[in-house]
Image (cartoon, rainbow, N blue to C red):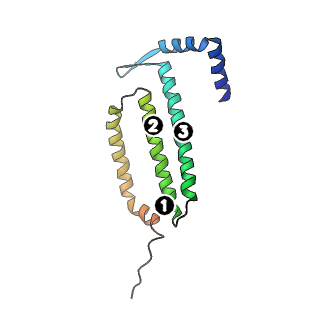
Amino acid sequence: MSWFSWLLVVLWVTGLLPLILLELDKITRTLGGNTVSVRSSLEAIVTAVAVKMLALWVSAGLKAKLVQAEGDNLLLRKMAANVLRAALVLLGLIFALSAAGINLTALGVMGGVGSGLGLQKLAANWRPITSVALSSWLSPACSA
């Protein structure tokens, strides 16, 4: 990765980077009524990777804080850390798509259908999940 950074620095110092970016901007393709250039695609990929790395870095730090915190139930803290990680990655993905210039309203419809199907599977497994998570708080009833 560092060699790529040095290559960009050398191209910038020599004055070739702006010329290369202009040429990449000229190569276009029409997708769904929108004109997409190679440059915008590369910028979108770089933004998405950077945002995902940042989200995973922040979530790893927060997970370490949550796991080290005082408390009774380690499983609930780990579950909270995983939910936090998923939320941060999703928020980062939305930010990266918005920064790339992708219209988020069309993705809202697909996301709604996809999340509905995903939540259906989660709802089917809700009882085993909660019984495992709350098993330390539950005690068997005494029969007299």
Q: Which mark is residue 100?
A: none
Q: Are marks 2 and 1 in contact (CB under 8 Å)?
A: no
Earlier sequence position, callout 3 versus callout 2: 3
Quadrant of image for the C terminus: bottom left
The residue at 58%/53% (across/down) is: 64
Distance in Å between CA atoms under marks 1 and 3:
24 Å
Looking at the rendered structure, the kind of residue marked 3 is: Leu
Q: Nearer the viewer, residue 44 or 119?
A: 44
Q: The residue tagged with tag 3: helix, strand or loop?
A: helix
Quadrant of image for the N terminus: top right
Earlier sequence position, callout 2 versus callout 1: 1
Residue 67 occupies quadrant: bottom right
Looking at the rendered structure, the kind of residue marked 2 is: Leu
Check the image and report above or below for 26 versus 65: above
- From the image, tell me which residue sits under label 1: 76
Local crowd size for mark 2, using a 10 Å CA cut-off: few (<14), some (14–19), many (≥20): some
> In the displayed structure, does residue 62 sit left or right of residue 5?
left
Check the image and report above or below for 137 versus 62: below
Local crowd size for mark 1, using a 10 Å CA cut-off: few (<14), some (14–19), many (≥20): some
Looking at the rendered structure, the kind of residue marked 1 is: Leu
> In the displayed structure, does residue 46 sit left or right of residue 100?
right
Count all numbered tags in the image, as a single digit. Answer: 3
> Residue 133's x, y, as percent?
46, 64
- From the image, tell me which residue sits under label 3: 54
Q: The residue tagged with tag 1: helix, strand or loop?
A: helix
The residue at 56%/13% (across/down) is: 18
The residue at 41%/83% (across/down) is: 142
Distance in Å between CA atoms under marks 3 and 2:
11 Å
Q: Which mark is residue 93?
A: 2
Earlier sequence position, callout 1 versus callout 3: 3
